[in-house]
Amino acid sequence: MKLPELKIGNKIARLPIQQGGMAIRLSTARLAAAVANEGGIGLIAASGMSHDELRYEIKLARSLTSGIIGINIMVAARDFAGVVKTAIEEGIDLVVAGAGFSRDMFGLGKESGTPIVPIVSSVKLAKISERLGAAGNRP
């Protein structure tokens, strides 16, 4: 069975699989790279990481794969904007944001061309996200 590709921004995953950004220091570079190497989207769980830890994980992931690597971060996390900016500076492919909502996150992505993928709980919030610049497939 041929599965459809998954397009987020200008990135196309050969397999329509996005690995979850599971907990603090559980989804790190090695897991994200393994998923990316198989054609999916690998996510580093960035919530709770210092900027230096995140830089290390992104660099390690990049050394292990040429596939799509993103971060998953809770909007409610301390220093949300700082962590997102650090990931963008390190060339992360996309940012998945959940556990809250911030209109400002879309501006961070727009400035750099980094796709922002919010996790939302309603159609209304999905439509608002789309108007603000959320990236991702639309069925």
Image (cartoon, rainbow, N blue to C red):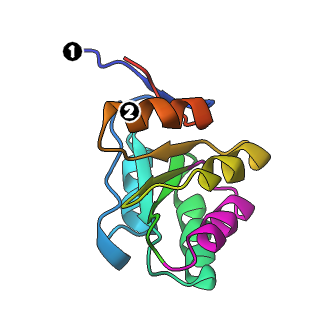
Instruction: Tell me if residue 81 can be seen.
Output: yes
Magenta highlight on residue 135: no
Secondary structure of the residue carrying tag 2 is: helix
User: What amino acid type is highlighted by mark number 2?
Assistant: Lys
Q: Residues within 10 Å of mark 2 (few under 14, many from 20)?
A: few
Q: Which mark is residue 1?
A: 1
Picture residue at 60% right of the left edge, 42% below the top: 115
Picture residue at 53% right of the left edge, 55% below the top: 102
Looking at the rendered structure, the number of numbered marks drawn on it comes to: 2
- Is residue 128 placed above or below 18 in the rendered structure? above
- In terms of depth relative to the viewer, which is nearer, 98 or 12? 98
Residue at far right of view: 111
Magenta highlight on residue 91: yes
Residue at far left of view: 1
Whether the residues at callouts 1 and 2 have beta carbons within 8 Å, the answer is no
Image quarter where the C terminus lies is: top left
Q: Which label's residue is closer to the chain start, 1 or 2?
A: 1
Secondary structure of the residue carrying tag 1 is: loop
Q: Position of residue 128 (x, y in %)?
A: 50, 34
Which image quarter: residue 58?
A: bottom right
Picture residue at 35% right of the left edge, 67% below the top: 27
Q: Position of residue 106 (x, y in %)?
A: 63, 46
Picture residue at 33% right of the left edge, 37% below the top: 17
- In the picture of the structure, the residue carrying the numbered disc 2 is 124
The segment highlighted magenta reads: 78-94
User: What amino acid type is highlighted by mark number 1?
Assistant: Met
